[in-house]
Amino acid sequence: MANTVLGVFQDRNTAERAVNELRSKGFEQEISIVAKDEKGGGADYVARGHAPATGMDSITNGVTAGGAVGGLLGLAAGVGALAIPGIGPVLAAGPLAGFLTGAATGGLAGGLADYGIPAERGRYYEEKVKQGHVLVSVRCDHGKINEAANILHRYGAQDVETH
């Protein structure tokens, strides 16, 4: 059974470094990223051949490459733009992004609940993203939980949890 390791980063640069190390350790399609789209560039901007206005391209580039993204519409260059109630525009990539397509009614917390995160913790993570933090999750088997959690901790992730 797959587990999900989550952590919250205060800035995109630190999240990017953590994601890069996760990828170097063999985590690829298991990584998901959710961040508020502060600039509103979203998928339309990416579809025109530009990097996302938020700089998420370097974080998400390759995260979903070669893998299904759960039917997320508007996916471009590994980034999907969604409007989440209570947060506004959000950029998401990875397996979690597919669960957020139904978040139009349940918000980010509802999408996280569908992903297997308890509702109370989902509301907490939703609030963190709303405040501008970056949520990184890694879906992995039991034998890789500690490795994923250690990488997130090493780069300063807060609230690292396994579900």
Image (cartoon, grey):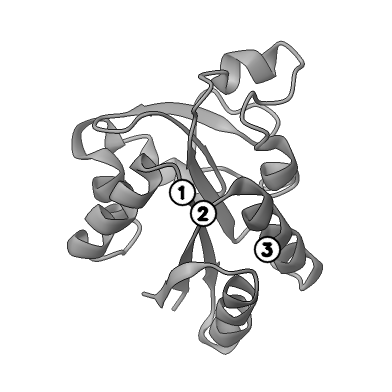
- Amino acid type at circle 2 is Gln
Q: Residue at x 71, y 36 (%)?
A: 57
**Disc 1 and disc 2 in contact, CB within 8 angstroms:** yes
Q: Quadrant of residue 105?
A: top left
- Amino acid type at circle 3 is Ala
* Gap between marks 3 and 1 measured at Cα: 14 Å
Q: Quadrant of the C terminus?
A: bottom left
Is residue 12 visible in the rendered image? The answer is yes
Question: x, y percentage for residue 106?
Answer: 20, 40
* Residue that label 3 marks: 18
* Residue that label 1 marks: 133
* Residue that label 2 marks: 10
Q: Is residue 161 above or below residue 75?
A: below
Q: Is residue 142 above or below residue 159?
A: below
Front residue of this view, candidates 1 and 24: 24
- Which label sits in the foreground, 3 or 1? 1
Question: x, y percentage for residue 90?
Answer: 44, 32
Q: Kindly state the secondary structure of the residue where label 3 is placed.
A: helix
